[in-house]
Image (tube, coloured by chain):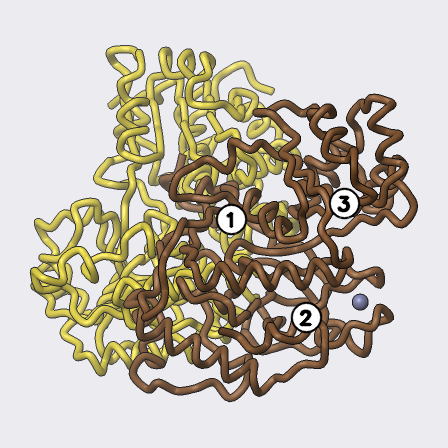
């Protein structure tokens, strides 16, 4: 259990408590996963504790694409495997979910989201197909992201059927009927394609304009950049047909950090909750970088028990921001600077 | 310019004439090392070795992978010495080095070279493109790189009965060093490895300290790490630095003792011994494709006989880093081994008239 979850996500931090929990979690993974011990042999032998968050052991995000990691420990009941969307290489990350972590992760994402969209349950409209839920033993990143909003939902409506781009406006109208507010969630591209640019029946437009809508989206901007759509255009297109007080909330998250999401605040920063930590590292030395320097993002949280995904070195680039944020949230914050560019080394035998 | 076909030697001289322009300017697609090698390769004295007696075979088709090393342009240049019609199938992916070399030669070459290059046609094609089938069907020489399966498919595609096939499959290479290797040898190993990492067929994917002890192996790795930054001065691209962090973890997971060269320039994965015990087989015997990164060099210490016995069947080149006596001993032990080439460490990537067991002049020319 993490006591850090008992305070609001962006209340003043307790770094000593965080470090103690993170160290304890590393010890659990070292004891319960032979794979993890093989990767951190010196820690497995010495049992050394990190003196700072930057000294905690980590796994490169690519490890989750190659190994199916699992930690066996008392009280850990494994559940489904969370799968990321396949990347260009065609392989997806696999993260072993478990009951205990699932509860912590749900509390975490609920607390973070409420901090941005306010408390209270309201209809949740998911721009995805309910069929995506029905796969046995696995859950996709898209679905996991949508499910993280369920604790805020009075009802949940899946608004797409199969690979149809047009949403089922009839279902949406039904969901909106008795509410004065709603949450609409989708991958960034889906929200653009199937909502912002979709033909809407007039009566649905009227329903939307009379309600406070929080549009929540995650996932990359690549397709939108290719379509020359910037954030302003995107936000405006969504808010055009939405009632007063409506907002767009873009969050960043990784399946390898399930439960911890980083919504963009109104001052353009991504805030780190009390139960998480972000380190920006020099790609060539791994030295932690101070604010203002771009490097590899390492994300740490204390919610991951089923597998050692509590500390992950990502291929996302970011930069810590200095000083206090205008939005009033405490703790460290960062901004994304894209991804590590990819290219291939020349060789002889790959056709 | 002339109404008679130039002789192979005249074509070699035409390539040689490109050198002053090459010294002045380098296409950005090629690294400094690659370009320097090409400049030296187009020297008449070097190209002459590729000219056979008799008539050149007229039509050559080259099937190149997307990320082909310098071998792609080198074979294209060799083909121009004999053939009038050269077709180059490039991968549909970008990142190719043949077209930049062709474009450079067309822009800066003299009239004779431009005339020769008028016979070269290149295109980005998929493997099932009908144009490729046509190119293979009427070629006198077919050259292909790729996995064994891909090459077999190309070799079996319809072709003339007299057509020759030259396949460059999935090969691996090793560097063999003495325990007391000089700094020069260490520096050469770093240079030879860094150019293509473990990806080139002539790149030392494994370094073996002959007759060395575990402590010699530790020393070699420390020396590689210590000298790396002064030999390779430009940092690896960021994505390779990140990939090396990943492959270091995967190699550790596979049971290797791993160090990263400074700047995450390479993964140096130490094996306890070259030939694992039966129970270790399959765990630490080879770095599986799962764990082998593009810049992962495995290292082991072994007795000479064990090193010969542990050579994989697809061994291409062995680069020797020894004094004369040591090299002679290694060469003697390698006689009859599957190794296609045994050369000095510094010459591992040097493309020579005898390649992969093929005598290229005899392939491209009819005696
Ligand atoms: Zn803020």
Residue at the (28%, 68%) spot, across then down = A34
- Taking B217 as reference, is B304 above or below it? above
In this view, the residue in front, B366 or B69, is: B69
- In the depicted structure, whether residue B16 falls above or below residue A326: above
Q: Is residue A96 left or right of residue B218?
A: right
Q: Alpha carbon of mark 3 to alpha carbon of mark 2: how far? A: 21 Å
Question: Label 2 belongs to which residue?
Answer: A9
Position of A249 relative to A330 (above/below): above
**Percent x, y of residue B351:** 36, 46
| Residue corresponding to mark 1 | B39
Q: Residue furthest front?
A: A178
Q: Colour of chain A?
A: brown
Residue drawn 66% across the image and 34% down it: B107
Q: Which mark is residue A215?
A: 3
Nearest to the eye among marks 2 and 1: give it.
2
- Chain in yellow, by letter, is B
**Quarter of the figure that contains the N terminus of chain B:** top right
A50 left or right of A323? Answer: left
Q: Position of residue B144 (x, y in %)?
A: 35, 30
């Amino acid at each position: 259990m993490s006591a850090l979850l008992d305070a609001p996500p962006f209340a003043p931090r307790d770094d000593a408590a965080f470090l103690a929990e993170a160290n304890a979690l590393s010890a659990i993974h070292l004891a319960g996963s032979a794979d993890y011990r093989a990767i951190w042999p010196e820690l497995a032998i010495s049992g050394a504790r990190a003196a700072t968050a930057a000294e905690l052991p980590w796994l490169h995000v690519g490890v989750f694409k190659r190994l199916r990691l699992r930690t066996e420990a008392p009280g850990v009941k494994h559940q489904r495997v969370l799968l990321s969307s396949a990347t260009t290489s065609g392989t997806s990350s696999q993260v072993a979910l478990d009951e205990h972590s699932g509860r912590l992760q749900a509390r975490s994402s609920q607390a973070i989201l409420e901090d941005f969209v306010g408390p209270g349950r309201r209809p949740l409209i998911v721009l995805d197909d309910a069929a995506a839920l029905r796969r046995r033993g696995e859950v996709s990143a898209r679905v996991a992201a949508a499910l993280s909003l369920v604790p805020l939902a009075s009802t949940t409506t899946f608004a797409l059927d199969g690979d149809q781009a047009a949403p089922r406006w009839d279902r949406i109208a039904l969901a909106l009927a008795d509410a004065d507010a709603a949450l609409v969630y989708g991958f960034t591209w889906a929200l653009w394609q199937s909502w912002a640019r979709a033909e809407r029946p007039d009566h649905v437009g009227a329903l939307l304009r009379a309600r406070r809508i929080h549009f929540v989206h995650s996932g990359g901007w690549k397709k939108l950049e290719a379509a020359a759509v910037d954030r302003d255009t995107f936000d405006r297109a969504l808010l055009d047909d939405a009632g007063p007080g409506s907002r767009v909330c873009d969050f960043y998250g990784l399946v390898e950090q399930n439960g911890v999401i980083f919504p963009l605040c109104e001052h353009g920063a991504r805030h780190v909750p009390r139960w998480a930590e972000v380190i920006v590292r020099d790609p060539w030395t791994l030295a932690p970088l101070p604010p203002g320097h771009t490097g590899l993002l390492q994300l740490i949280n204390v919610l991951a028990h089923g597998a050692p995904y509590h500390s992950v070195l990502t291929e996302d680039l970011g930069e810590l921001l200095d000083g206090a944020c205008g939005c009033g949230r405490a703790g460290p914050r960062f901004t994304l600077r894209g991804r590590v560019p990819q290219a291939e080394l020349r060789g002889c035998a790959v056709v | 310019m002339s109404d008679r076909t130039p002789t192979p030697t005249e074509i070699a001289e035409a390539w040689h004439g490109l050198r002053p322009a090459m010294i002045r300017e380098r296409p950005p697609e090629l690294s400094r090392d690659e370009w320097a090698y090409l400049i030296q390769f187009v020297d008449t004295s070097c190209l002459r070795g590729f000219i056979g007696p008799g008539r050149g075979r007229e039509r050559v088709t080259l099937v190149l992978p997307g990320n082909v090393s310098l071998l792609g342009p080198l074979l294209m240049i060799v083909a121009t010495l004999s053939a009038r019609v050269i077709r180059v199938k490039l991968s549909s992916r970008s990142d190719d080095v043949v077209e930049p070399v062709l474009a450079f030669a067309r822009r800066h070459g003299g009239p004779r070279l431009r005339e020769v290059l008028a016979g070269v046609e290149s295109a980005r094609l998929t493997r099932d493109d009908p144009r490729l089938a046509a190119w293979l069907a009427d070629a006198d020489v077919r050259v292909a790189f790729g996995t064994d399966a891909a090459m077999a498919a190309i070799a079996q595609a319809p072709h003339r009965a007299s057509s020759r096939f030259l396949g460059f499959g999935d090969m691996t290479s090793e560097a063999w060093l003495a325990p007391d290797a000089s700094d020069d040898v260490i520096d050469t190993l770093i240079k030879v490895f860094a150019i293509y990492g473990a990806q080139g067929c002539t790149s030392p994917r494994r370094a073996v300290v002959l007759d060395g002890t575990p402590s010699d192996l530790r020393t070699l790795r420390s020396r590689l790490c210590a000298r790396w930054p002064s030999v390779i001065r430009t940092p690896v691209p960021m994505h390779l630095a990140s990939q090396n962090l990943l492959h270091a973890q995967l190699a550790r997971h596979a049971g290797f003792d791993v160090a990263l060269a400074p700047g995450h320039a390479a993964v140096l994965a130490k094996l306890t011994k070259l030939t694992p015990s039966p129970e270790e087989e399959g765990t630490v015997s080879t770095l599986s494709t799962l764990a082998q990164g593009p810049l992962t060099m495995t290292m082991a210490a072994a007795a000479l006989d064990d090193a010969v016995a542990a050579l994989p069947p697809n061994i291409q080149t062995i680069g020797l880093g020894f004094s004369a006596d040591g090299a002679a001993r290694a060469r003697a032990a390698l006689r009859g081994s599957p190794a296609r080439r045994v050369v000095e460490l510094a010459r591992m990537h040097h493309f020579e008239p005898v390649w992969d067991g093929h005598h290229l002049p005899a392939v491209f020319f009819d005696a």
